[in-house]
Structure formats: structure tokens, C-alpha cells
Amino acid sequence: MLRRLTTPHLVRLLGEWRGGGTAYLALAAALRALILEGRLPPHTRLPSERALATALGLSRNTVTAALDVLREQGYLASRRGTGSWVTSPRLPDDRPDERLAPASDVIDLTLANLPAPTDLGVLASRAASALAREFGGHGYEPFGLPAARAAVAAYLSRRGLPTTAEQVLITQGALHAWDLVLRAFARPGDRVLVETPTYPGALDSLRAHSCVPVSVPVGLDGWDLAFMRSALRDARPRLGYLIPDFQNPTGFCASAAQRVAVVREARAAGALLVSDESLAELWIDAGKRPASLAAKDAGASVLAVGSLSKTVWGGLRTGWIRADPEIVRRLALARGSQDVGSPVLGQLLAVEVLPRLDTLLDSRRKLLRERRDALLKALTAERPAWRAACPSGGMFIWAELPHTTSASALAVRAVEHGVRVAAGPRFGAGGGFEQRLRLPFTQPPERLAEAVRRLAAAEDTLGPRSSTGAPANRWIA
Ligand SMILES: Cc1ncc(COP(=O)(O)O)c(C=O)c1O
């Protein structure tokens, strides 16, 4: 069923959309930004082209040309007699802003990953030597190689979460783990609790499974527990996806008391919680570490997801789910129509890496501390008006821009200045966060300083509250 949108309402949403340049492209970009931010949800019918043209003081041809652009990009559909309506935004397969970027020397802040540690090559050679021993078998391991499951179980137990190999399923990273949980436990239309803001990849998976997000606000001081309670009790979500440790994008780390409260509420509501612990080991400032959300769970209502992507290297594509053995079995079955199992070579490398992870992490934390401090220093020097809290771990600063700057507009302009960055709206299930920019501190200090200089130069070229199209960054990590 289509929802109607009046002409004055759309004009109000568009605000100051004329940023200079060709009118039809600017209008298309502004409408696209509204669609991507969730402010023009799918199934919203736009006013007629004639009404819009009159209200905006444009020729009908200009409005038609703008809508043609959106139709071509898959954001709008039209039918004679019905008009035009918003379709579910299909994010482009490539990076659409790539073409606009200077040919070289773009600093990409949309991805938060460290380069591989230097010793990884040696460990990879050892894994490759061990591969020959596996050749006699079939190579399909939906639960994971026994050695890899045992290595993850030993690692988690060392971290204070006693785990047996039967409780472990090896996946191709944390995002794959979450997708597998959705595949096994969610049906189209099911409600799924998520933090807002949250990791965009998790939201994309949820949409791909046609689930409905139930958003619970999270800030630097933590989850809004009252909101969490009412969301769990009233919306009765089947699943919840939380990032309790150094959350992407806020950097927030839940206290032990918050963890206990959330697990208790989820159990009472019968929701299965997924605790994405991809960033849990990346604490930077020493202090008491709260235990895994799964450690607070006496039953089978928390699935802990982990990955080597953030701690070691994104290209490993190796992660895991730690859950009750019966849940592990269901997840392994759900793999039958998907990937059947993780690549054996990657699992053998995990067997080499996991026992050495604590040593590797010492140098990762040192690197992240230097880079976090360098980013904060650059922000203080170049953009004192931006507010940037210092996270005690993880990889991100969730910078708050002055209310005169739109993060989407800045992200678009930044590409012209040689920086690609993820604007706040990409992190909310229904958009929002137009005052926020996620800045990862995974690049070397001098690159971060240069990125901030370029962002500052880009912001200086923006008019007050310029509203251009949000860059539809498909790949955000
Ligand atoms: C919280 C969170 N979970 C999962 C991922 C993706 O992890 P993986 O590469 O293991 O799929 C990311 C990447 O940014 C992340 O921030």
C-alpha cells in the first residue's frame, strides 16, 4: 500500500536543496539523500511532477529529469495513473562516489581495518604446510574443522568464557555469522532488536532477510535501558543484535550491570541475543574488562559472535559463533544451502593465530592508541567546534558536527577533497544522525592528520546546512 506525501511536506523535507550546479542533478541528489536516510521510506508516493515543479519554482522538465535519474538508479518506480513512489533503496554494487574522486591519493575512512601484522606471512606458510594433511578428506566442514573449533574454544575459555568445541561453529567472519543466525532463526517480517546507531552491515543483512528493525538508542553512556525494556516487552522481537564492546560506530562499552540487565530482559521476553564481540579485545586504555554478554547467560539465550577481522586482518574471513550445541547444530544445517563450510586454509591459519593472539594484540593496541591520540589531536587543532569523545577502545570516533554542518553534505563534498567517509545516517535503521561522522583511527597518524585537514577544507566550502545527496557507501566496515 502506498503512503501519500503532500507537496508542502516534501518541500519541507527538502529544505535548502539547491547547492549550486545543475538543478535537476541537485534535486535528484537531495531526494536520494532523503530516501537513503529513511526520511522518505519505501512505498511513499511523491506529489505529481506538476505540483512539485510549481512548489519548487522549477520547470516541469527539470523535475521530470530529476525523477528520471532516480528511476534509473532504482530509487523510484512510476506507473501511469499512480505516479511515482519510493522503492526500497537498492544500494549500488560499486562505490558510486568512486568516479567523482580524484584519481589517486584518496584517504578512505569508510573502512576500519588495520593492515595485517608482519608475522602473519610466517603463520600462513605453516597453515599452508598443514593443508596437505587435509587433502584425503572431503573438505566440507559445516561446523568447522575440529582443530579450529578447539582453538576458538580454548581462546574464549582463556578470555573468561568457558567454552567447549561443541559450542563453536566456524564462520566466514562476524557478518557471515549474523547472516547465518538470521537465516536459521528469522522469517520475513520478524522484528529484530538493534542498537541505533549500529554497524551498517548488520542492518543490510536484516533488510536482506526482510526483517523489521526495532531500534534502541545507544550513546556513549550506554544503552537506553528503559527503551530496551519496552522494546523487548512490547515489540517482542525474535532476535536482538548488540555490540557491547567498543561499539561500531559510537565506541561505547557496556558496563557489567548493563549487561546483566539486558540479558535478564531478553530472557524474560524470549528473545535470542547476538552479541557481536568482534571488537571486544581492542581495549586501548587499561582497566577492568566486563565479561562477555554470554557469560551472564545461564541458559541458551545469548550467541557470542567473534572474528579475526578487526584484531588480525579483514582478509582472513574467519569468525565464529559460540552458542548452545543444539543452536550450533541448527546453524550448521542452515549452511547447507549457503556456503557449506568455511575454507579449510583459513581455518588452519586461525589454528596458528589464536594461540598467539594475546601477543599480537599487544602491538595492535599500541598502534591503535597512537592513532586514536593522533586523530583526536588533529581534530582539536583543525576542528575545535567538532565534539569528539575519547573512546577507551575500538577503532572509531563518533564525531559530532556543529548543527550548521550536515554530515551527508560533508561526506559528499569530502570526496572532492580526497577523503571518503561514512556519514551518520548510514548507521541508523531509519536514517538520522545527520550531525555525526564516523572517523576510524586505523590509518597511520600522518594520514589521519591529512584526512582531517581535507575534511576541514571540505567543510569550509559548505554553505550553512547544504543538503546534497548522501554518498551511498556500500562498503562500510
Ligand atoms: C561490529 C562489527 N561486526 C562485524 C564486522 C564485520 O566483520 P567481519 O569482517 O568479521 O565479517 C564489522 C566490521 O566493520 C564490525 O564493525
Image (spheres, rainbow, N blue to C red):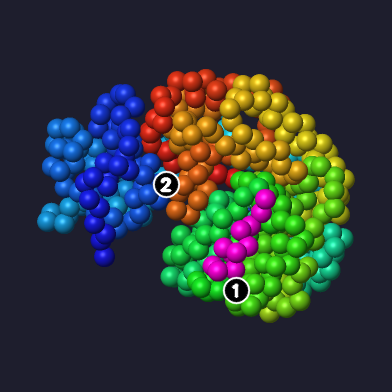
Q: Position of residue 361 (x, y in %)?
A: 82, 45
Of helix, strand and loop, which one carries label 1? loop
Q: Quadrant of residue 273?
A: bottom right
The label shown at residue 37 is 2
Of the two numbered discs 1 and 2 on the same chain, state the one appearing first in sequence: 2
- The kind of residue tagged 1 is Ala
Identify which residue is drawn at 60% across, 37% down: 399
Of helix, strand and loop, which one carries label 2? loop
Which segment is the magenta one? 221-231
Magenta stretch: includes residue 385? no
Q: Give the distance between the C-alpha atoms of the residues marked 1 and 2, in whole angstroms.
A: 28 Å
Q: Position of residue 101 (x, y in %)?
A: 46, 27
Identify which residue is drawn at 55% across, 23% down: 456
Q: Quadrant of residue 285?
A: top right
Q: Quadrant of residue 64?
A: top left
The foreground one among 240 and 315 is: 240
The label shown at residue 110 is none
Quarter of the image that includes the C terminus: top right
Task: Find out whether the residues at labels 1 and 2 contact each other: C-beta distance under 8 Å.
Answer: no
The label shown at residue 271 is 1
